[in-house]
Amino acid sequence: MERTPPHPDVSEFDLQRVLEALVDPVRRSIVAQLGSAGADIACGGFDIPVGKSTATHHFKVLREAGLIRQYYRGTSRMNALRRAEVDQAFPGLLDALTGPHTAGSPHPEPTVRHAPPAGRPAAR
Amino acid sequence: MERTPPHPDVSEFDLQRVLEALVDPVRRSIVAQLGSAGADIACGGFDIPVGKSTATHHFKVLREAGLIRQYYRGTSRMNALRRAEVDQAFPGLLDALTGPHTAGSPHPEPTVRHAPPAGRPAAR
DNA sequence: CACACAGTTCGATCACCGTCAAACTTTGAT
DNA sequence: ATCAAAGTTTGACGGTGATCGAACTGTGTG
């Protein structure tokens, strides 16, 4: 079976795709966690408010945009931030989005637009 | 009746909202055109592939995100890029998104269609 | 081997967003 | 006063994407 999923080359990076990936709060959180951790993290090691299947979807979007690199280690799928390559393609973007501050938006609020509260969606 | 729509203050800028505004190619194009023109542009002076009502919608989104400032001038509604304020809230973001190249993004970059040289409303 | 673990695939649902056309409003010019 | 120009408002519509649960697959460990 395929052990390593397809990753785009730096020359294939597309701004539109990268933005569509980073506009989602959950995905931006993943990238931020990878950035501040300074180390690779397994899919299950992130603090995100969604189920496993949804998480898989988010990782796929990030990978296909070129923001992260995925590889297997045992039964775990590890995720690495492709910082150098993203910086090369879009200088300043990551810093502006996951920077230490992102001043002006002191909103820890999830800004949940779609996500039903983890508890009881009740009706959908 | 001097119709001046509501504009958010810099302190109210929200990264999520700004990103949602800039993820749309049409809106990013509007911002890019404003940036490269270096002058304010009337709603009808942009090179965008959508109808008037849709354009109105896009301008509203940009304005509510704090990216542009709108004011009337005769029957025309002028649009000004709030560059300084956006830069203050999110340093590097505009440069990264509408910067010189934005490599990897297949953006035709519509030959700097110079808008009708509006006067100098100054202020902002 | 057998089981638990980590993640993927699939199908369905639901919200939101971008889009348009038509009717309306406001302002400037004739 | 009329007309034209420039946007806005409204209502409808379709597509896309985020989400979930359930079933499934591959991998290491006991």
Image (spheres, coloured by chain):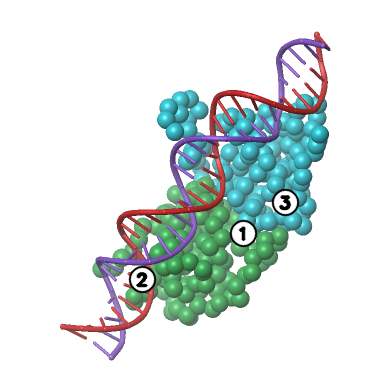
Chain colours: A cyan, B green, C purple, D red
- Seen at 63% across and 38% down, the residue is A57
- Seen at 67% across and 39% down, the residue is A59
The residue under label 3 is which amino acid type? Answer: Val
The first of marks 1 and 2 along the sequence is: 2
Q: Which of A37 and B91 lies nearest the eye of the viewer?
A: A37
Name which quarter of the figure residue A5 lies in: top right
Task: State the mark number for residue B97.
Answer: 1
Is the residue under label 1 in contact with that under label 3 (CB below 8 Å)?
no
SS of the residue under disc 3: helix
SS of the residue under disc 1: helix
Is the residue under label 2 in contact with that under label 1 (CB below 8 Å)?
no
Quadrant where the C terminus of chain A is found in the figure: top left
Give me the C-alpha separation between circle 2 and circle 3.
40 Å
The residue under label 2 is which amino acid type? Answer: Tyr
How crowded is the residue under tag 2: few (<14 C-alpha within 10 Å), some, or many (20+)?
some
Give me the C-alpha separation between circle 1 and circle 2.
28 Å
| Chain letter, disc 1 residue | B
Is the residue under label 3 in contact with that under label 2 (CB below 8 Å)?
no
Name which quarter of the figure residue D2 lies in: bottom left
